[in-house]
Amino acid sequence: MNSQPIIHYSIIICAYNPEENILRRCLNAVQSLNVSNILTEIIFVDNNSQPALYDQEYIRQFVHSSSVIFLNVEKQGLSYARSAGIKAAKGKYIVFFDDDNEPEENYIIELVRLHSDFPEVIAWGPGTVNVDFLGEVDEKLRPLATAAFQDRHETSVLYSNEPSWQPFYPYGTGLSINREYLLQYISLVEENKFTLTGRSGGQLTSGEDVQMVLFCLSKGASAGVSPQLSITHMVPSQRGTLAYLVKLTYGTSVSYSTCVAEVFPDYIKEVYAKIMPERKFIRRVLKKFISLTFNPNPIKKIDLVRYIGAIAGDYKAINKPLPSLVGWVLTKLKAI
């Protein structure tokens, strides 16, 4: 009996209501990846887009021309889409591309080199992320938006197994992780030990990609980035607005403490040790908010949202209710 060939890389593309021009660029880039002598498979996951993506001709052409495994996941949330892709995958390594990611053609070739040269590193991500705004962006917002969409330009390979988050650790864009680690991760998700669902519909609460990396670190593995892993992050015009950045900033910052505590339970002790008393929290938030009303600077607004999100995240991690006045400020800021 002939054994099945071993698949090296499973490329998982998750999409939810994508813009056609952006998704086409993503799919074209994936089809153009240099995978000479590397066995790969492509898994496309529609996370309940409306209308359904398979109803669109260009998607059907992509699926059939590239022998793609197509999945439809009705339960809303990026982590559910990714979990379905992981379960369907047969590759030793998983590579995640979102529908707004455009990898360079040698992305898989570089992963092969990295896995050979640095076997202790289980989670790799791009050290080069170019943010491509597809519409006009207010010049005052451009630095904020560029950073928010994970722009980075490392000059060397960087990696570590330090369990606290390092600035060079990879995010979800172009993330690649050993499948065995991810299978362990999603089993814990299904046991409700990891609760972050990622972007879900219009909600921008994040954290599941960071949690995947932290989980690898908790197992003694390393995580890192390489500048030769290069990707373009395409940003449609509606995401380059202050309104979107406010929601994205809050969703990211409020998730962090829960993200860490679910992987490293002892982190809760640190949260209790640093938790800000409710009255002090309210006083500081109101002071910053009043100052902002007299000087509506977008940078200060983002800073305030990030400040509230970090402390609100600590409250959330220990199941402490958010003060109603702080919730009122978040509503006024349109962060929630």
Image (cartoon, helix red, strand yellow):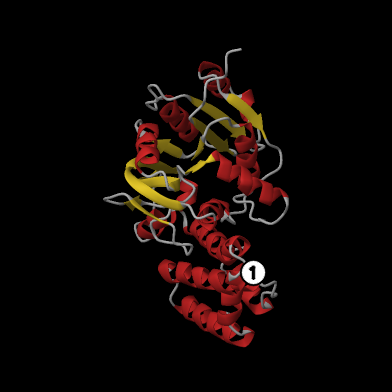
Vertical placement of residue 45 versus 305, above or below:
above
Residue 154 place in picture, x, y as percent? 30, 52
Front residue of 128/287: it is 128
Residue 306 place in picture, x, y as percent? 50, 68
Q: Amino acid at mark 1?
A: Ala
Vertical placement of residue 10 versus 253, above or below:
above
Can residue 28 be seen from the camera position used here? yes
Q: Residue at x 61, y 35 (%)?
A: 85
Task: Write down the residue under mark 1.
Answer: 317
In which quadrant of the rendered image does the N terminus lie?
Answer: top right
Image quadrant of residue 71? top right
Q: Secondary structure at mark 1?
A: helix
Q: Residue at x 51, y 41 (%)?
A: 178
Image quadrant of residue 141? bottom left
Residue 234 place in picture, x, y as percent? 42, 42
Front residue of 52/67: it is 67
Vertical placement of residue 280 versus 72, above or below:
below
How many C-alpha atoms fall within 10 Å of the one at disc 1: few (<14), some, or many (≥20)?
A: many
